[in-house]
Image (tube, rainbow, N blue to C red):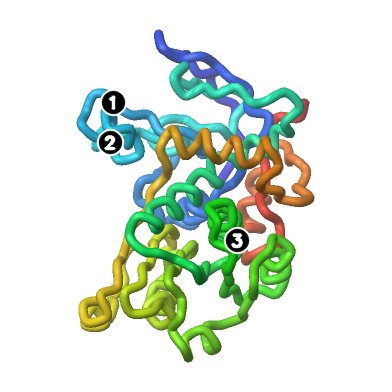
Amino acid sequence: MAVESVDEPRPGDDEVLVRPDAAGICGSEIEGYLGRMPNRVPPLVMGHEFVLSCRACARCKAGERNLCAKRRLIGVHVPGGFAERVAVPTTNLIALPDGLDPRTGALVEPLANAVHAVGLARRVVAAERVVVLGAGAIGLFALHAAHAAGLPDVRVIEPNADRRAAALAAGAQGAHADATELSSDRSADLVIDAVGATVTRRTALDIVRPGGAVVLLGLHEDETALPFHRVVRDQITLQGSFAYTDAEFAKALDLLASGRVVLGALSNVLPLEAGPDAFASLAAGPTALVKTFLAVPS
């Protein structure tokens, strides 16, 4: 990873140039940094916040632009937000409420992912007890989204002590270092895997109740062997979850702007020049930070 000077983006007919005030580093971008994401190939300016879709296919017309077969992601297929300027379609621009911290605005996108995951889960299972695997940014947002949806009993499994403490501060009913206690009774109606590793996918099946549901949100590993006899015989629903709809993005913005979701202290925005060191630090292991932000200093 390097900091380079490049030509300023040239916006198309339906695009405008914007100056990012805060762009968060996503876990999927760390995977790309480590060479584990085949859709993130250098040279690439990462920093993804929006989905570009055709707006003409059946999925787009149904309000599911996240499932458009022709979708493109800023920061994946076109240059992204870790830059002084980024070209953005006018249809993707949403005004932030006056006074909203730009860092909070940068967190609308990951929270929308969690709102989408919880919404999908509620279609397939009546949930009272929820377990979230992983208490990184997406795991914490899943915790908040579940609470906002009226699901009060949300627990997390997270090996990192600082992240467990953050989950408890965010309102988790319990924070466990491993699945030992929760797998003994298999009472979780819903498990949200915010990691996406083989170990967490298998753990999800160990703790979900018969007739329950597992929402697969994390993307750490592409392939996993699972005990499908258990899935079939216990009638466990496996539900994938990708991105969000426009309505869910608006919902996430409202949750943050209204104060219904409060994230606590946020880290300072780092200059773009600090990007390589920030990525290296995050790739080295988990931190207690909700999100690391990059931008050009104001």
Residue identifier under label 2: 68
In the picture, measured across the screen, residue 287 lies left or right of residue 71, that is: right
When the figure is inspected, residue 273 is found, relative to residue 9, above or below; the finding is: below
Instruction: Label 1: state its secondary structure.
Output: loop
Above or below residue 178? Residue 118 is above
Proximity of marks 3 and 1: CB atoms separated by less than 8 Å:
no
Per the image, the residue denoted by label 3 is 136
Give the crowd class for mark 2: few <14, some 14-19, many >=20 residues within 10 Å: many
Q: Earlier in the sequence, mark 2 or mark 3?
A: 2
Number of numbered discs = 3
Q: Residues within 10 Å of mark 3 (few under 14, many from 20)?
A: many
Q: Amino acid at mark 1?
A: Cys
Q: Nearer the viewer, residue 292 or 84?
A: 292
Q: Residue at x 55, y 49 (%)?
A: 26
Quarter of the rendering containing residue 134: bottom right
**Residue 119 percent coordinates (x, y):** 42, 51
**At label 3, which amino acid type do we have?**
Gly
Residue drawn at x 60%, y 27% is: 5
Amino acid at pointer 2: Cys
User: Residue sitting at 54 percent across and 57 percent down?
Assistant: 146
Which residue position is annotated with label 1? 54
* Picture quadrant where residue 18 is located: top right
Q: Secondary structure at mark 2?
A: loop
On residue 203, the disc is none
